[in-house]
Image (cartoon, rainbow, N blue to C red):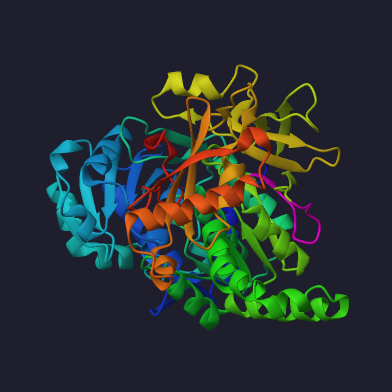
Amino acid sequence: MLKETLVNYIREGIEKGWEIKALSNYMGKDFTYREIAIMMARIHLFYRENHVKEGDKVALIGKNSVHWAIVYLATITYGAVIVPLLPDFRPEDIQKLVDHADSKILFSEENLFEPLDPTSFPRVKTIVKLEDFSLLQAADDKVTAFFGQWDDIFQQAYPEGYRKEDLDYPEITNDKLAVISYTSGTTGNSKGVMLSHNSLAANVRYAHHHMPLDPGDRIVSFLPLAHTYGCAFEFLFPFTLGCHITFLTKTPSPQIITKAFAEIKPRLILSVPLVIEKIYKKQIVPSLEKTTMRILLKIPLINKFLYNVVNKKIYQVFGGNFRELVIGGAAFNPEAEIFFDKIKFPFTVGYGMTECGPLISYASWDTRKLFSCGRPVDTLEVKIDSDDPENVAGEILVKGDNVMEGYYKNEKATSEVLDPDGWLHTGDLGTMDKEQNIFIRGRSKNMILGPSGQNIYPEEVEAVLNNYPLVSEALVVGRDHKIVALIYPDFDQLKKLRITTDEEVLRVLDDVRKEANKKLAAYMQIYKVEVMKEDFQRTPKRNVKRVLYK
C-alpha cells in the first residue's frame, strides 16, 4: 500500500487552488476550487441525511460535466463507492448494472433517466437530477423534505460560510474500495472492475511525478470520464494538481475538439489514436503524396524545412500550447507513428487497462522508443510470459499497487485473470527489451492461426489497410485459416471518384487488397475483401466490437 491517499490528493488540490478556476463546462460557467468544495460539502450533507455509509454504492450516469465531477469527488471523499456508467449504454443495460452494483443512490441526467424503470433497481432509495441536483425520486419523506431545506441545513452546518479549514474529510485508507467500473454495457459480458483507493492514488502519484503539468495549467476533458483513462488523467490528476479543467459536455466531434483546443490552449492533451490518425490520413497524407512534395522530400535540407512546417501546422491544430500529446486506449497506426516521430512531434504512446486504473506503462515523448508504449510505472512489476521476452511475444503480466481487487460479485471471472500470486493476466501479447520498453503485438484472443500454424496478429494487417484513403476502417478476421478483410469504405472519397455501384466499390477495394498484400508477409496475405455498408459497431472509446464480427 502507498502512503499517499487519493482523498489527501483531492484535499491538497482544493487547498492549493481555492480561489482559482477549477472546473468549467465548455462555453459555460467557471467554478473555483472553493465553489467546488462547497458543492461537495452540500452533497456530503445529503449523504448523511440519506443514511449513506462508508462503502455504500452511488451510481452516476451522464456526459462529462462539472456536476458529474462534483458527484465523483464528493462520493470518493465521503468514503462511499462511485459507480460511473457510460451514457452510451442501453437503458436496459443501465438498469441491470445499477442493480448489480447494489447502488443506494442514483445521480442521472434527466433525459437518461426518463427511459429507465426504477422498479428494476429496487435498492436505489433516492434519484437525483444531475443537471441541477434537484430530486427526481425518493422513497423516504424525510429525504424529500431535505431537498426543500438544503440551503438552510447547509447554513446551519457552516454559519460562517464554508472555509478552507472546513476541508475535514475522513481518513479513508487505501485498501478501501473507491470505484466499480463496468467495462461493457452488454449485460452478458459486463464485469465490474473493483478499483481501490490505492489503485487510483498510484495513478495520480505517478502522473504528479512524471507528466508535464503545473498548477494553474489548462486542460480539455473530452474522453469519457466513466472510463478510467479520461477520469485519471483528464480529471483526477489535473484537479489534484490545481489545474483548470474544461469539460466538453457534448459529443466531442473533431470540429468541436479542435475549436476548444484553439480557444483554451491546453498544456497537456490526451487522446485515443482515432483522432490523431484521422488528422494524419485526411490532412497530411494527401499533401505528402503530391508529386512536387515527394520530390522535395528527397532533398535533405528542404525536407527538414518542410517537416518543421508540417510540425508547426499540426501543433497549432491542438492549440499551439501543449507540452505533450499522450495517445492511449488502442494501438497507434505504425505508419502514422513513424511520420510523427520523423517530424519530432511531441507525442507519446502509453499502455493501460481498466483493471489497472488504468496505467501500466508510459515514457515522456523525448525518451520513448519508436513503436513502444513506454516503460512500466514505478508501482508495478511487469513481465512477459515467454521463454525469450525480447524476441518472442508472450502474454503481458502485471502485479502491484495499480491492479484491481477483482470483478464485483464475479469470482469466476476474477480467478481467470488474477492468479494466486497476484499477477494480472492482461490478455495482451507483447515483448519487452532490456531497457524495459514494452511493445504490444496484439490481443491473445484476437490472434489468428495461419495455414501453417503461424501466429497472425490482425492489428498488424489492419494497420496496413487503414492507411489507404479509400478505407475508413478495416477489420481482419480468420476463416478456415484464411485472412478476410471486412472494410468499411470512405464513402466521401468514393463519391469524389464517382464510384457508386457495389461492383465498382468491391473492385477498387480488391485493388487495395492486392496493394496491401505487397507489404505483408506471405503467411499474412489477405484472401478476400468483404464490403461493410455501415460502420462497425463500436465501444464508447470508439474501438470496434470485434466479438460481433468473428
Q: Is residue 31 left or right of residue 317?
A: left
Could you say which quadrant of the image residue 337 lies in? bottom right
Residue drawn where x is 13% and y is 39% of the image: 119
Could you say which quadrant of the image residue 273 lies in? bottom right
Residue drawn where x is 20% and y is 60% of the image: 111
**11 vs 359: above or below:** below
Residue 349 or 513: which is nearer the viewer? 513
The answer to whether residue 215 shows anywhere in this view is yes
Whether 368 is among the magenta residues is yes
Q: Is residue 470 left or right of residue 215?
A: left
**104 vs 421: above or below:** below
Horizontal and vertical percent for residue 36?
Answer: 44, 67
Horizontal and vertical percent for residue 231?
Answer: 50, 54
Residue 224 or 214: which is nearer the viewer? 224
Q: Is residue 492 left or right of residue 337?
A: left
Q: Which residues are the magenta region?
A: 360-370
Q: Main secondary structure of the magenta part?
A: loop
Q: In what quadrant of the picture does the N terminus appear? A: top right
Could you say which quadrant of the image residue 3 lies in? top right
Horizontal and vertical percent for residue 286?
Answer: 59, 72
Horizontal and vertical percent for residue 172?
Answer: 52, 42
**279 vs 68: above or below:** below
Whether 182 is among the magenta residues is no
